[in-house]
Image (cartoon, rainbow, N blue to C red):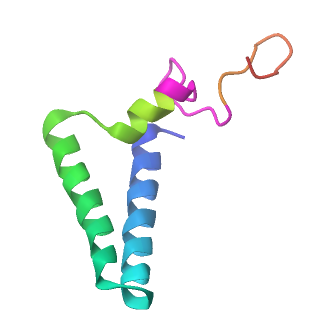
Amino acid sequence: MKPESFVRILAGSFVLAGIALTLLVSRWWLLLPAFVGANLLQSGFTGFCPPTFILSKLGWLGPDGTIHWGGRRDPVDGCPR
């Protein structure tokens, strides 16, 4: 999976969760979709995307730019490093 697809899925999930929580719990949950929208705007202008940064720090973002769930795998035995 490419990071762009992951970020879109993550952002959409957080927006829908924020709207559902707003309807079921409290109006304050509208801050969650607002934060997601602000983060998407800053990412569009600056090119810095926190979820992609976190994926790379976890070792889940490969050198080819694809996400490897659970980290990088050893090419010899297929076990996580």
Seen as rendered, the residue at the extreme bottom is 24
Seen as rendered, the residue at the extreme top is 76
Classify the position of the C terminus by image quarter: top right
In this picture, residue 32 sits left or right of residue 1: left
Classify the position of the N terminus by image quarter: top right
Q: Position of residue 22 (x, y in %)?
A: 36, 83
Q: Is residue 62 magenta?
A: yes
Residue at image coords 44%, 89%: 24
The picture quadrant where one finds residue 77 is top right
Count of marks, rendered view:
0
The residue lying toward the viewer, choosing from 59 and 75, is: 59
Residue at image coords 55%, 28%: 58
Q: Position of residue 11 (x, y in %)?
A: 38, 58
Seen as rendered, the residue at the extreme left is 45
Q: Position of residue 29 (x, y in %)?
A: 34, 75
Please indicate, yes or no, whether residue 4 appears anywhere in the rendered image. Answer: yes
In this picture, residue 7 sits left or right of residue 81: left
In this picture, residue 71 sits left or right of residue 7: right
Q: Position of residue 33 (x, y in %)?
A: 30, 67
Q: Is residue 64 above or below residue 31?
A: above
Residue at image coords 27%, 69%: 31
Q: Is residue 49 above or below residue 27?
A: above
Numbered range of the magenta stretch = 57-70
Please indicate, yes or no, whether residue 61 appears anywhere in the rendered image. Answer: no
Q: Is residue 51 above or below residue 19?
A: above
Q: Main secondary structure of the magenta part?
A: loop
